[in-house]
Image (spheres, grey):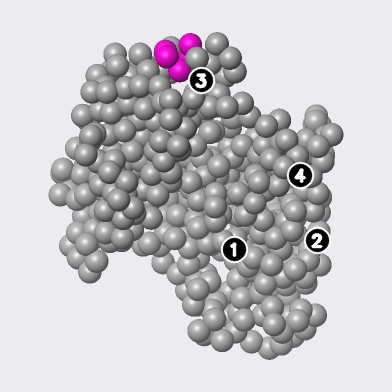
Amino acid sequence: MANAAVDDIPARRVLTDPAGLARYQHDEAEWAPYGTPLAVVRPQSTEEVRDVVRHCLAHRIALVPRGAGTGLSGGANAVDGAIVVSFEDMNRIVRIDPAERLAVVQPGVVNDDLRAASAERGLWYPPDPASSPWSTIGGNVATNAGGMCCVKYGVTRDYVLGLEVVNGLGEVVPLGRRTAKGVAGYDLAGLMVGSEGTLGVITEITVRLRPARPQERTVAGYFSSVVAAGEAVSAVTASGVIPSALELVDRHCLAAVDAWKKMGLSADADVVLLGRVDTPGAEGDAEAELVRECFERAGATWAAVSTDQQEADALFQARRLAYPALERLGPVLTEDVCVPRTAVPEMLARIERTAARHDILVANIAHAGDGNLHPLIITAPGDEAARARAQSAFEDILDDAIALGGTVTGEHGVGLLKMRGMNKELGSAVLGMHHAVKAALDPHGILNPGKVLGG
């Protein structure tokens, strides 16, 4: 690559050596294709990002923004000849404003680091994807990440007030606001959330914070099948309680975590449903008891409100460990469908039938309280026949989610893996609107090409 590409950026922040480029080629989407970038640039300022975008415009080079690479849809995967812009060095919390309850951060700030810094000021940043110890706020914004507490507190979009973005013309533009309210013009900041780097390159993010949350109570239930656990989810929804988390972990995930971390979870249950309630005082106690009753009425073999906080935290830690534990068994093709909460039992039943029909192992974890299911399709390394069956199962699960009134992705994004499903879900008229927006904001087609909308 001619150094003219990045003349104004110190050489130590530009990688062109093939060995150095390798770790930036793809995210965690095991089966998504990827290419070889021309270079990786690790900017430290908005101005440096702007300069890279302008160079890519001048030379019609594709630009792929990248956070921590924890994505599960191939959205950050390199394409041949692209410049990958890694935000690992733009990792500064610019300020936290307790009076206005907001934080201004660079895109490379790790989610848990922002949560910890907010907690020091008596504040809380709610979005908490399972990857929160590693994923970045920029990546969370790019995919509109959710997490365990979004059943009550919403997803990343609900907390983004404003953005600084380098657009497809190489201009630095402020979007959104830092006030509690504001309706001047279209919600272009909201449009950027979930756009996966295809409409602009985010260089700064202003997020809303909440007061520190109350103490949570944990309710655990053991079930003999995922369908029974799904019925418990529907029962909790019908009860009127809004839990602060409602997570499902099946026997395959429990066994994988046990094999790795020796936590002894899989001996007592085929499926664990984990609920949390953070309503203060006696009302919260009553809600936790009502959740427990919902579990029992749905057929739980055991259900209880935990009195041991360490034990309760261990159960939720097992939920976070489920995906990396399963990766130890072989390549994992990760689903991310979301269905109406009342359809959760039927969707789980359909997933089981799909696994049997294709003779493939499908493990299930889920943000069950908001209908966001993560079927995890696992094959043995090198088993190409199983891989082909897994890909067929993947598409069948997408079709079933759409048929039940759901969506093909709740929080992981479309990236490269969900384009067919998204096209089927949205239809031609809505897709035409998407293409019109893309053409308007990225007229030269350099921003993360081939992702979400395809070529």
> Rounded to the nearest whole Å, what is the CA distance between mark 4 and mark 3?
27 Å
Give the quadrant of residue 107: bottom right
Residue visible at 66% across and 46% down in the picture = 116
Identify the residue under disc 4: 103
Give the quadrant of residue 121: top right
> Rounded to the nearest whole Å, what is the CA distance between mark 2 and mark 1?
19 Å
Instruction: Look at the numbered disc 1 and give the secondary structure of its residue.
Output: strand
Are dots 4 and 3 in contact, CB under 8 Å? no
Q: Residue 293: within the magenta?
A: no
Label 3 Cα neighbours within 10 Å, binned few <14 / some 14-19 / many ≥20 = many
Instruction: Residue 179: give x, y in percent of width and height.
Output: 83, 34
Are dots 4 and 2 in contact, CB under 8 Å? no
- Magenta stretch, overall SS: helix
Of callouts 2 and 3, which one flags the residue occurring earlier in the amino acid sequence?
2
Of callouts 4 and 3, which one flags the residue occurring earlier in the amino acid sequence?
4
Residue visible at 45% across and 69% down in the picture = 34
Of callouts 4 and 1, which one flags the residue occurring earlier in the amino acid sequence?
1
Amino acid type, callout 3: Ile
Instruction: Residue 37: give x, y in percent of width and height.
Output: 55, 77
Give the label on residue 66, or none: 1
The number of callouts visible is: 4
Identify the residue under disc 2: 171
Identify the residue under disc 3: 242
Q: Nearer the viewer, residue 325 or 428?
A: 325
For marks 4 and 2, give the one nearer the viewer. Answer: 4
Relative to 136, residue 422 above or below: above
Amino acid type, callout 2: Glu
Amino acid type, callout 4: Ala
First to last magenta residue range: 286-290
Left or right, 249 with reference to 447:
left
Label 4 Cα neighbours within 10 Å, binned few <14 / some 14-19 / many ≥20 = many
